[in-house]
Amino acid sequence: MSANKHSTATGGSGMHVQTDLLDRVRKLLAKAEDEGCTPDEAEALTRKAAELMARYGIDRALLGAARPETDRPADRMVDLPRPWSAIKGHLLAGLAVALRCQCVLVSRATGRVAHVFGYASDLERADILFTSLLVQMARALAAQDVPAVSGGEAKAWRRSWMLGYCSAVVARVRAAEEAAVAAASSPAGGADDGGRSAALVLADRSLVVRRRVETAYPHIRRTKVTYTGRGYADGYRAGQQADIGSVKLRPRSAGALGR
């Protein structure tokens, strides 16, 4: 998966506008990642970057409705190796739903595999965020003072901490997406060439994605993630401070959503 500017090769002003939007995201994130940036400044910058990323998703959806060749339904298989494969799957599934994708988790002897369905532009955004947040979560957890408890209790604490972290970052991504959809669905918001509102375009795309999942997996069992440790609240607070756009949109992502 690539996040470079090759998309402008399809021509048309819409793709150039989206490239400009991604350039703005790059600049905001570069400022937020500067060592001289205060925490408050970084939070404001990254919040704006998340808002622009959400707007990028809607712009791509509207363009795809007018020109289907620019953004087609797709799917990716993602390896979720141990350790903590269930946590990784929980994070990816949450991000997928927030970004209008769907994720099916499959257990294997070597760990778990996630089958992610969505439109290409949304899969790209999920790739960027998931790759970044995995690294951020690991670094943040390594910096925690784990309570002085026995081995099993320490593992439970780490698991609950990571679940709290995942809940916080997914909630932040979802909030940015919902705000962008609300703005685009207002009377002054966007519409496709047929005059359909952004909300209708996104609803149609969600239906396409859901049908693709149902065709591939007609029998899906939903599961709940539970925890026993006491680190959830600490993890949630750390997730509220995570950079939900900190990975620079480089020529190629780290491949979290590889084919």
Image (cartoon, grey):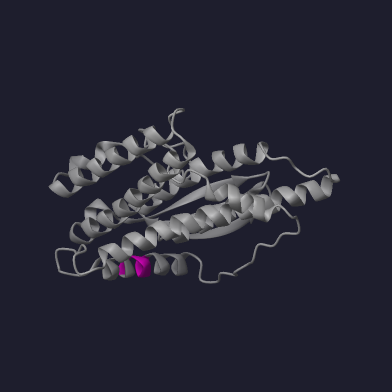
For the N terminus, give its image quadrant.
top left
Tell me what residue is drawn at x 63 percent, y 54 percent.
Answer: 163
> What is the x, y in percent for residue 161?
67, 50
Q: Residue furthest right?
A: 150
Q: Is residue 111 left or right of residue 186?
A: right
> What is the x, y in percent for residue 107?
64, 56
Q: Is residue 199 above or below residue 80?
A: below
Tell me what residue is drawn at x 51 percent, y 71 percent.
Answer: 218
Q: Which residues are magenta?
A: 204-208
> What is the x, y in percent for residue 236?
60, 53
Tell me what residue is drawn at x 52 percent, y 57 percent.
Answer: 93
Q: Is residue 36 left or right of residue 241?
A: left
Tell me what residue is drawn at x 37 percent, y 67 percent.
Answer: 206
Q: Nearer the viewer, residue 4 or 39?
A: 39
- Magenta segment, prevailing SS (helix, strand or loop): helix
> What is the x, y in percent for residue 138?
61, 40
Q: In this figure, what is the number of numbered marks? A: 0
For the C terminus, give its image quadrant.
top left
Q: Nearer the viewer, residue 23 or 109?
A: 23
Asked if residue 112 lies in the magenta stretch, the reply is no
Residue 252 is at least partly visible in this image? no
